Structures are given as structure tokens and as C-alpha cells.
Image (cartoon, rainbow, N blue to C red):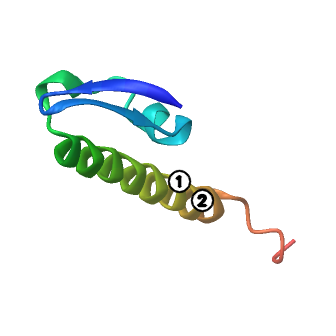
Amino acid sequence: MAEVEFRDGSKMLPDYLSDLMVGLDTYRLTYEEAVAEANRRLERRHIDSAMGAVMRQHLKPDEVLR
């Protein structure tokens, strides 16, 4: 558990959630705003990972034709 300061007060957060908020100026955000931003970051990371996998597969030499 980690204590994180938000604009609307400090809260004890599980480690996974405080890790997602690293780099956010949480003291400038309310708890709800920080959670929403952490969710957007997680969503973006998931989309980027999936798109990277598609691009790697697309750019891989076609071994079936050889």
C-alpha cells in the first residue's frame, strides 16, 4: 500500500494503482481524475501493444511461400 496525495486529500492505494499513477501530478488531480487518467494510460498501453503485434506480424517475412 502507498499513500498518494490528491487535490481532494491523501489516500492509501494498492501498489498496482499507485504504480499506474507514477508520473502523474496527483496533487493537482482529484482521486477520480487520477484514476481516469491511469485507466486511459493502461488502455493506451494495451492498444499500442496490440498494434505493435499486428505490425510485427505484418512485417515478418512470409515463410509459407518459401
Give the x, y percent position of residue 16: 54, 40
Q: Amino acid type of disc 2?
A: Ala
Give the x, y percent position of residue 17: 45, 41
Q: Is 1 situated above or below 36?
A: above
Q: CA distance from mark 2 to mark 1?
A: 6 Å
Give the x, y percent position of residue 39: 34, 53
Q: Nearer the viewer, mark 2 or mark 1?
A: 1
Which numbered dot is residue 49?
Answer: 1
Q: Which residue is mark 2?
A: 53
Give the x, y percent position of residue 65: 81, 76
Q: Amino acid type of disc 1?
A: Ser
Q: Is 51 situated above or below 42?
A: below
Q: Is disc 1 surrounded by few (<14), some (14 to 19) or many (20+) residues within 10 Å?
A: few
27 or 47, which lies in front?
27
Point 44% across, 33% down: residue:
18
Q: Are marks 2 and 1 in contact (CB under 8 Å)?
A: yes
Q: Where does the C terminus fall, quadrant-wise? A: bottom right
Q: Is 26 on the left-hand or right-hand side of 43?
A: left
